[in-house]
Image (tube, rainbow, N blue to C red):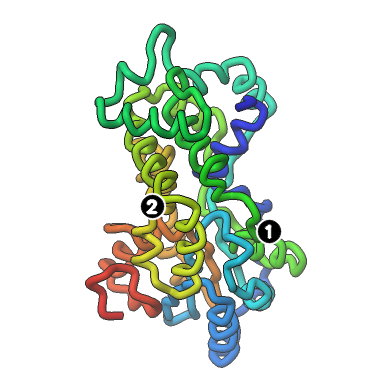
Amino acid sequence: MKTTGLLTILLAAGTAATIAPRPATAQETAAPANANDEIVVTARRSGAPMWTIETRAGVIILVGEIAEIPKATPWRPERLEGATERAQRIILGTKAKVSPGDIFRLIFRGGGLTKLPKGRSAADYLEPQQMKRLGALESRFDQDYARQNFLMTAFDLLSKRLAFNRDTADDASDVVRKAARNTKTPTQPVGEVRGEDMLDNLFAAAPETHIPCLEAAMTATEAGPGIVVERGQAWTGFDVPAVMANPLEAALGRCWPWTNDGFGPALRQQWVGAIHDATAQPGVTLAVVPLRVLAEKDGVLDQLEKRGLAIKGPAWRKESSR
């Protein structure tokens, strides 16, 4: 894998690029209650799973996003676009601040990310059963993963062999970002992270920390391309537990940076804080949040519920009666 394309893959795995926020003006006021209801209805008709939180000042719409939606998935992005154009403010994913120095650093040190430490191979880290599964995939796809970093092997399995990111439509955040740009709707990233910090974190990660990611990627690849379509269908069918249980979604959620002790919890808490702050804002706040961050155990929805917020929308866990 070329290092020039590596940074894009890593940032796409953990963050969503955002447009620069435009500060709210003094003219920004709360929309009438009936207008808020109309925006919610329009957004829901898009086919993307979402939850609403009604506050004294207005309403918050949380759109549960999955990455790389197959074009065959029947959803109506124009409805979400219409809701965006009428919202008072937008919250999107973490903004990655990448400098030219970060790119050059990746180019010159990319080998440290793509390969295992000198003199080591996969057999030095994996159990015999794990090696057997990896060997079977090597034979199946005519690849040699023996010296490759486990995170890179996982990305190769998911993106090239399972091809989950091929023939895809715009993600929900892409749709909302474009609509907000056209209407100059105030938009803010949920937080910011420096490319330098991300690379430092990744370079410092021991090879064995990526083994759970590799295992999940092998499971998804072994399951076959049908899971890509099934994930999209469960998403538009509002079957959130089925999306979360899908091997592909499970694999994406078990890879860096979501499972990293340094970045993972911080990314999640940024969303909790931003949404809680939005409860004091007038009118409609529309936030596009990774579904895995919303619906996982002790995730954003669970934490917001514990704070006493009334959340309306599809069940996000099996035992939920919503």
Locate residue 30: give its quadrant: bottom right
Q: Which of the pair 201/9 is nearer the observer?
A: 9
Quadrant containing the N terminus is top right
Q: In front of the other: label 1 or label 2? A: 2
Give the residue drawn at x 44%, y 64%. 275
Q: Residues within 10 Å of mark 2 (few under 14, many from 20)?
A: many
Residue lying at 32% horizontally and 18% vertically, measured from the top left: 123
- Decide: is 204 above or below 11: above
Residue type of the residue flagged with mark 2:
Pro
Farthest residue in the top direction? 119
| Rendered location of residue 141, percent (x, y) | 51, 34
- Where does label 1 land, which residue? 22
Residue 192: x and y in percent read: 54, 44
Look at the numbered disc 2 and give the secondary structure of its residue: helix
Quarter holding residue 31: bottom right
Question: Is residue 260 placed above or below 48 in the rendered structure?
Answer: above
Residue linked to disc 2: 247
Q: Which of the pair 148/134 is nearer the observer? A: 134
Q: Amino acid at mark 1?
A: Arg
Task: List x then y, in percent, for residue 132.
Answer: 32, 29
The answer to which of marks 1 and 2 sits earlier in the sequence is: 1
Q: Residue 88 location, x and y as percent?
A: 62, 73
As drawn, 215 above or below 77: above
Task: Determine whether the residue tagged by mark 1 lies in a helix, strand or loop.
Answer: loop
Q: Which mark is residue 266?
A: none
Spatial CA span between label 1 and label 2? 38 Å
Closer to the camera, 296 or 120? 120
Q: Please, which residue is most extreme toward the front here? A: 139
Q: Nearer the viewer, residue 252 or 40?
A: 252
